[in-house]
Amino acid sequence: MSATGAGGGGFRANLQRRLQDLLRKAPLDADGIARIAAAQIYIMPTPTGLLYAIAAFTMLMGSLNYQNNLGLMFTFFLVAVGLVAMHHCWFNLLGLAVQVRPGPAVFAGTPAQFEVTLHNTRAAARFDLRLAGGIDPGTPVCLNARDQQMVLLGLPTRRRGLLALPAVELETRHPMHLFRAWSYAQSGAQTLVYPRPAATAPAPVQDQGQARRPAQRGGEGRDDYLGPREYRYGDSPRHLDWKALARERGLIVKQFGGEEGLDVWIDWAQLSTPDPELRISLLTRQLLDTARSQVRFGLRLPGRELPLDRGQIHLQQCLAALALFNPGGDGIGNHGQA
């Protein structure tokens, strides 16, 4: 993107944020629930509502011109129906309670999920409730009296870091779709976005572990899986990772060892790629490939080191460190997402 385009996009984003700050939003209470009050509901006619108003106005002018009392009565009936529809549309959001929880961490490029729970605290049903601003429009939600329902809101992820959802926009067109009422409920939810893994990455640094593996019986030690590495000329085809090749990740060899274990270090300094984001993407691929083996692995970043360990929890901690890593600073920082 050119500098002019980037500047224009930044200006539009700043203008949009300023306009959003001016809007009245339902605040969060001590329990993290936002309740929509009367002053926080906006309402406007829909295109169908505008056509409805034009038709009623045309009938009014015609009935007055021809002094048609039956036409005037029918016109006033249509106006009364429109006013009642406007009141019910506005009332459909009044008092609705909204609670937002973040979903699990995802990789950049994968939609992030937020769990939005709608609480109907009144003794009447609510119809045609929708969440706006997500990837998918979703189906309308109908809440019975004193009922609640959880709806998933998906947001796109473009880069790593913390993805915050400052507010949730709810809308309704009930009844008759003549008016659209909407409101904004504040949310303090944020989810973590892992870096996008590269398709392939160089083999990480491997050191001899200080502790030896327990003795294996029947020669099983030489079949221990140590982790993947790039293909080298002369490697046996039996050790090729054919599944990785089918995923277009290139030629990757499965490494097997004996009784001595190996410690694998995912090291920032071992990569010479000048682009820091590409380097983080390569480190992410190394982490995912190494975590599939039974070896211990650690992560070394400028200003921070995660010790050797194994398992899914350790993998998530390493991925979180990469997601929040600030290459321009002195280590780990809050790498936010635009």
Image (cartoon, rainbow, N blue to C red):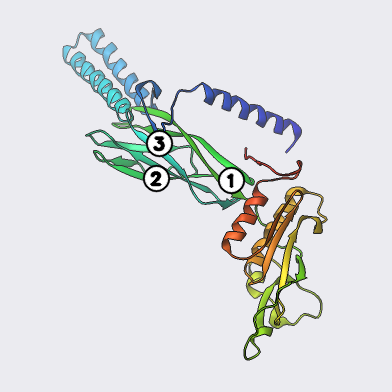
* Residue highlighted by disc 2: 151
Q: Amino acid at mark 3?
A: Asp
- Quarter of the rendering containing residue 289: bottom right
Give the class, few, some or many, for how many residues have Cα within 10 Å of label 1's Cα (few <14, many ≥20).
many
Say if residue 198 shows up in the picture.
Answer: no
Return the x and y of residue 264 as percentages of the image width and height.
72, 67
Return the x and y of residue 326 as percentages of the image width and height.
71, 44
Q: Residue at x 71, y 82 (%)?
A: 258
Q: Residue at x 55, y 51 (%)?
A: 105
Q: Nearer the viewer, residue 332 or 27?
A: 332
SS state under label 2:
strand
Return the x and y of residue 179 as percentages of the image width and height.
35, 26
Q: Is 74 situated above or below 183? A: above
Give the class, few, some or many, for how many residues have Cα within 10 Å of label 2's Cα (few <14, many ≥20).
some
Q: Is 181 situated above or below 252? A: above
Q: Is 89 situated above or below 207? A: above
